[in-house]
Amino acid sequence: MAALRPIPVNTPKFWGGEKELVAQCIEDGWISSEGPKVKEFEEAMAKCCTRKHAIAVANGTAALDIAVKALGLGEGDEVILPSFCIISCITQIVRGGSIPVLVDCGDDFNMSVDEVTSKITPRTKAILCVHTYHFPVDMRPILELAKEKGIKVIEDAAEMIGQTCMGRPCGSLGDISTMSFYPNKHITCGEGGMVLVDDPVLAEKCSQLRNLCFNPQKRRFVHDDLGWNYRMTNLQAALGWAQLQHLDKAVARKREIGRLYTKLLEGCPGLILPPDQNALNEVNIYWVYGIEVAQGVPVDAEEVMQQLAKVKVGTRPFFWPMHEQPVFKEMGLFKDASYPVAERIARRGFYIPSGLALTDEDCREVAERVRAVMAGIC
């Protein structure tokens, strides 16, 4: 019997043109953040997201750090965010002395709007909306609530590049929005991120924060605030700009992969598959193909992933909730907190290979191996 070929959880897609642009940076000697491709990438991403300003940064975490500080969130300010998210969403909130106020998610993996409403207090200064896996957050009621209460909205659109919400591009909806260009995103720089805003004052603040708070109006190496070296290099920007030219194709291919998986896995015992549309008629972007192990199955996602690893299928677990993170328990945060949906999907959710370089034949192989594993379990 022939050995099974490994199918990794992600392999990025290069459409053509990336190599030439990156090589041109090397030939021209422009490899640092001072190179012209950074500005070109920023302008192209701002246009893509219908924003007035885009600030390129080193990664998605950097974008979130800058967003929190640029809005002036600090000691004692409350920031509402989902428990079900990646830890980079909460890191700068905690480090800056703000109080993270968690909410549960719905079965679509996005934050519960009803819980957001119930958690508003006079100390609430911001809501961090994190679009997760398949669909955007239901932004309309959150934006209306934020406007009514004078609360800022941070939109983490890292997983929704190319997705729409309320007929607008994701990345255009927050007072400040962020993106990530990690290799599993719809466009990649290897590492990279973007901050997106309309307010020119906020844009200038973000630009300074990414560059150690150098002030172009003052003598160099004289600083009025503390920032970071979160700059994006010209090499990264060249790669990102080239990738952005193919965003529509990337989104279309993700949806092809997702729909093919659903066709191949439909009726597979013990698995809950993602829907193609949600209640708001938003179309699944299938950033990843996220699966939940049904409640009646006697094992959790970890066991299923271990079995899939034996047949060379790469997987990743879902996020682990913030209220259950050891680092925050050690800090005394979220004592006795319970968010049942986040707890359930963290234990019963995982995703299968979802990278843009996946072929239809890869999908068929993955589905066949998933079916075989689930048949052995159920």
Image (cartoon, rainbow, N blue to C red):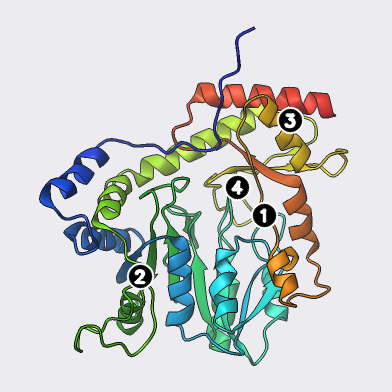
Identify the residue position indicated by label 2 in the image: 229
Nearest to the eye among marks 3 and 2: give it.
2
Mark 1–mark 4 Cα distance, whole angstroms, equals: 10 Å
Identify the residue position indicated by label 4 in the image: 277
Going by the numbered disc 2, the residue's amino acid type is Asn
Question: Is residue 169 in sight in this rendering?
Answer: no
What's the residue at 58%, 88% (across, down)? Answer: 149
**Which SS class for mark 4?**
loop
Residue sitting at the far front: 221
Going by the numbered disc 1, the residue's amino acid type is Asp
Going by the numbered disc 4, the residue's amino acid type is Gln
Mark 3–mark 2 Cα distance, whole angstroms, equals: 42 Å
- Earlier in the chain: of badge 3 and badge 2, it is 2
Marks 4 and 2 in Cβ contact (< 8 Å): no
x and y, in percent, of residue 373 in the image: 75, 26
Identify the residue position indicated by label 3 in the image: 307
Going by the numbered disc 3, the residue's amino acid type is Gln
x and y, in percent, of residue 198 in the image: 34, 76
**Which SS class for mark 3?**
helix
